[in-house]
Image (spheres, rainbow, N blue to C red):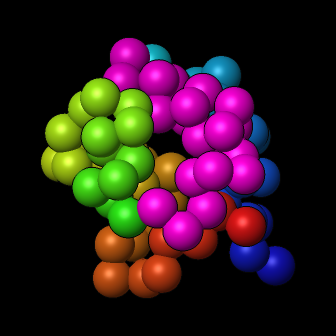
């Protein structure tokens, strides 16, 4: 069974550092408002680059070619 985005972020949060932890914290703290955001929208909200978001998505085990849904 595949973990949801939120569950995976919660399970990995303590292993993250730097920008990855900042992104994870933002997503978990703003769960209702981040759903449906684009990579660019999330990057703007967290104040990081889209490349940083892309690397984060890959580090937590998702692929950008997949739909990155946090639900």
**Where does residue 62 sit, x and y in percent of width and height?**
47, 66
Residue placed farthest to the top in the image? 18
- From the viewer's perspective, is 16 left or right of 57? right
Nearest the viewer among 23 and 18 is 23
Point out the stretch of residues depicted in magenta.
Answer: 18-37
Note whether 11 is above or below 21 in the view shown.
below
Viewer-nearest residue: 23 or 33:
33
Extreme residue toward the front, this view: 33
Residue 64 image-quadrant placement: bottom left
Judge left or right: residue 68 versus residue 27.
left
Q: Residue at the spot x=54%, y=68% of the render?
A: 36
Residue found 39% across the figure and 37% down from its top: 45
* Residue 70 falls in image quadrant: bottom right
Q: Quadrant of the C terminus?
A: bottom right
User: Toward which corner of the image does residue 40 lie, by quadrant?
Assistant: bottom left
Q: Quadrant of the N terminus?
A: bottom right
Residue 63 in sight from this viewpoint: yes
Q: In the image, is residue 64 above or below residue 6? A: below
Task: Identify which residue is drawn at 57% across, 52% down.
Answer: 34
């Amino acid at each position: 069974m595949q973990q949801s985005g939120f569950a995976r972020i919660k399970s990995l949060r303590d292993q993250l550092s730097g920008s990855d932890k900042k992104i994870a914290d933002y997503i978990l703290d703003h769960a209702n408002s981040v759903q449906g955001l684009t990579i660019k929208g999330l990057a703007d909200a967290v104040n990081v680059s889209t490349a940083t978001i892309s690397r984060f998505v890959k580090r937590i085990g998702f692929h950008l070619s997949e739909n990155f849904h946090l639900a």
